[in-house]
Image (cartoon, rainbow, N blue to C red):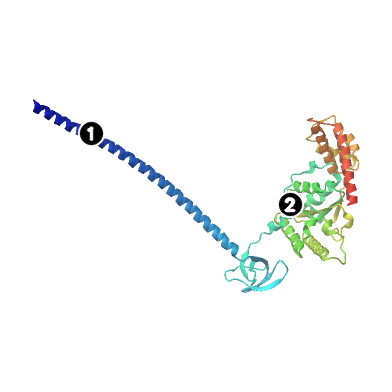
Amino acid sequence: MAKVNENDTLNNKVVYSQTVNTVDLEEENKILAEAVEKLEQERKAISTNLARVEQESSILRELFNNTNNELNNLKKPSLLVADVISVHGDKATIKLPNGNKFYCYIAQHIKDIRSGDAALVDQKSLNIVEKFEANDNFEVEKYVIVGKPKEDWSSIGGLKEVVREIKEVIELPLTKPKLFESVGIKPPKGVLLYGPPGTGKTLLAKAVASSTNATFIEVVGSELVQKFIGEGAKLVKDIFALARRKAPSIIFIDEIDALASKRMETGTSGEREVSRTFMQLLAEIDGFKPLDNVKIIGATNRADILDTAIIRPGRLDRLIEVGLPTEEGRLEILKVHTTNMNLRKVVLKEVAAKTENFSGAELQAVCTEAGYCAIRENREYVTHNDYLQAIERVRIDEEEDDAAGLIG
């Protein structure tokens, strides 16, 4: 009996040992699986970080190369832009911006350079190292305004006779050139609009450009007067070349008296440069045929100081005065400017009667000021009294400006 009990005890010990070993093995396997999973996660994280580092390294390498290339380019000596006057085999005569001319060599890889082209030349040797595709439009368009105006004849009031003349001289030759050929006459190449400031000279030029669907090239006369010798004349030449490329076009020269005033026999170097620019303008006008798709409109407040060469027959030979509007004209102008205004009991005829000697610009200022009178009182409509206050305000401002001009 005792021996049986010993066997049972031994068997129980063996079973218990096996059970413990199984439990320990499962625990170890679980721990190992967790360790493997953790290592796998760490491996993925390291791989992700490695890929990110490699990407950043690639970006930094590219940035370094770009910066290094830019630095090398900045260290290179700059080149001069010159005009090629004539080509003689592997040599050429060039002209620098300062007017100096040089006889230089042409690099062997340049095959198609011709007279009139622009070229890049070395600063020291002045030899041509590269052909340069110069964009003249970029230089010209710094000084001019090019566009298609939206103003039309309906936006102009009180200038019926002036509008009729401009239509005859500018609009008809552009829209019906064969009619002039059939009649056998040559229309003027351009017109000169003269009169007090604010009477609508610029607006007239934009309206005729709009009615003919022409490119409107606006330039101020003083902008054509440049600092360095020859630049003004070149600018005039480039403007007319731009007008030919964008034809049909209208060149509008505002304040033309700054360039085309009466010439004096003697003067400073600046006055001589103005004279050279003016001569180039006359040459360009003479180069146009009367029925070309380019028309010239000049505008000035001082027609009395203009050189007679600009207004002789064959140039700006049609002089059109744009004066202050009459009472009837002022009424038409007021109707144009009040089309979109919310008026209440406003008698425009009385307003027109009280604005004697007002220009079109001043009448527009009256309408704007009347609107401000309503806004100050938080009203959405304009009354007759607002207009009376606006007239006095504009008249006072004008008198103060005139007094300041006299003092200055």
Q: Position of residue 94 (x, y in %)?
A: 68, 70
Q: Position of residue 366 (x, y in %)?
A: 84, 39
The residue positioned 82% from the left and 59% from the top of the image is 259
Question: In the image, is residue 259 above or below residue 323?
Answer: below
The residue positioned 50% from the left and 54% from the top of the image is 60
The residue positioned 25% from the left and 36% from the top of the image is 24
Q: Quadrant of the N terminus?
A: top left
Question: In the image, is residue 324 above or below residue 271?
Answer: above
The residue positioned 75% from the left and 56% from the top of the image is 292
Q: Quadrant of residue 328?
A: top right
Q: Amino acid under label 1?
A: Val
Residue 33 — which label?
none
SS assignment at label 1: helix
Q: Quadrant of residue 309?
A: bottom right
Q: Tell me if residue 230 can be seen.
A: yes
Q: Amino acid under label 2?
A: Ile
Nearer-the-camera pick, 356 or 61: 61
Q: Is residue 222 left or right of residue 93?
A: right
Q: Position of residue 408 (x, y in %)?
A: 88, 52
Q: What distance separates the C-alpha of mark 2 from that of mark 1?
A: 97 Å
Nearer-the-camera pick, 49 or 171: 49
Question: In the image, is residue 352 above or below residue 208?
Answer: above
Mark 2: few/some/many CA within 10 Å (<14, 14-19, 20+): few
Q: Is residue 37 left or right of residue 365?
A: left
Nearer-the-camera pick, 396 or 311: 396
Mark 1: few/some/many CA within 10 Å (<14, 14-19, 20+): few
Q: Quadrant of residue 334?
A: top right
Nearer-the-camera pick, 23 or 381: 23
Residue 20 — which label?
1
Asked whether the residues under the numbered discs 2 and 1 touch, taking CB atoms below 8 Å apart as contact, a structural biologist would say no
- Name the residue beneath numbered marker 2: 145
